[in-house]
Image (cartoon, rainbow, N blue to C red):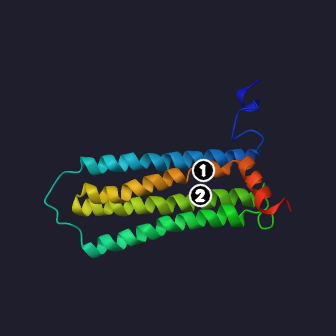
């Protein structure tokens, strides 16, 4: 039997074609975004050293506070979308709106995380400080790993939906 029809395919087994496409889109998008972290690190490492003054402490503080807020917001948004909104009483599991909410929500969450890493990149270009860049790079990399698109597995979603709200 072909691999696509094997009962051990994992995420793609037993799901509809639109859900299969959503899962593939999510994983490809996440993978490309994730690969940008080492590329950004390489760009900072290859930057020519100069006599740049440290960035304005107010700017670094504002970007740090905004970064912490956006990372917290990414977790809150994930909870809202995947624990509250996508629920049999609001958006039924398996509907087209479920796929829209999964993909749209995932893209927004990943964009929030990536924007915080870009804050560090901007500060690194201003100050040429690797330590300052790594203060943004490391937590955002870890948060991106936490936001893997595993939640798009339809079996997990159905199981979670029955645990938190029943089937109707």
Element under disc 1: helix
* Crowd class of label 2 (few under 14; some 14 to 19; many from 20; radius 10 Å): many
Q: Residue furthest right?
A: 168
- Left or right of 11 on screen, residue 69: left
Q: Residue furthest front?
A: 163
Circles 1, 2 touching at the beta carbon (< 8 Å) = yes
Image quarter for residue 163? bottom right
Element under disc 2: helix
The residue where tag 2 is placed is 106
Residue 150 lies, in percent from the top left, at 62, 48
Nearest to N terminus: mark 1 or mark 2: 2
**Residue 127 showing in the rendered view:** yes
Image quarter for residue 63? bottom left
What residue is drawn where x is 63% and y is 56%? Answer: 103
**Residue 95 showing in the rendered view:** no
Q: Residue furthest top?
A: 1
The residue where tag 1 is placed is 149
- Left or right of 60 on screen, residue 96: right
In this view of the protein, which residue sits in the foreground, 155 or 24?
155
The quadrant of the rendering that contains the C terminus is bottom right
């Amino acid at each position: 039997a072909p691999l696509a029809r094997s009962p051990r395919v994992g995420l793609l087994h037993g799901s509809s074609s639109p859900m299969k496409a959503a899962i593939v889109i999510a994983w490809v998008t996440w993978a490309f975004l994730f690969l940008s972290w080492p590329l950004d690190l390489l760009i900072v490492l290859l930057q020519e050293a100069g006599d740049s003054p440290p960035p304005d402490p107010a700017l670094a503080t504002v970007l740090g506070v905004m970064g912490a807020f956006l990372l917290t917001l990414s977790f809150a948004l994930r909870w809202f979308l995947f624990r509250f909104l996508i629920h049999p009483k609001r958006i039924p599991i398996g509907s087209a709106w479920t796929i829209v909410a999964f993909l749209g929500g995932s893209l927004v969450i990943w964009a929030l995380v990536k924007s915080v890493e870009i804050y560090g990149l901007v500060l690194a270009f201003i100050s040429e400080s690797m330590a300052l860049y790594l203060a943004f790079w490391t937590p955002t990399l870890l948060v991106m790993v936490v936001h893997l698109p595993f939640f798009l597995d339809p079996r997990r979603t159905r199981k979670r939906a029955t645990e938190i709200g029943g089937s109707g």
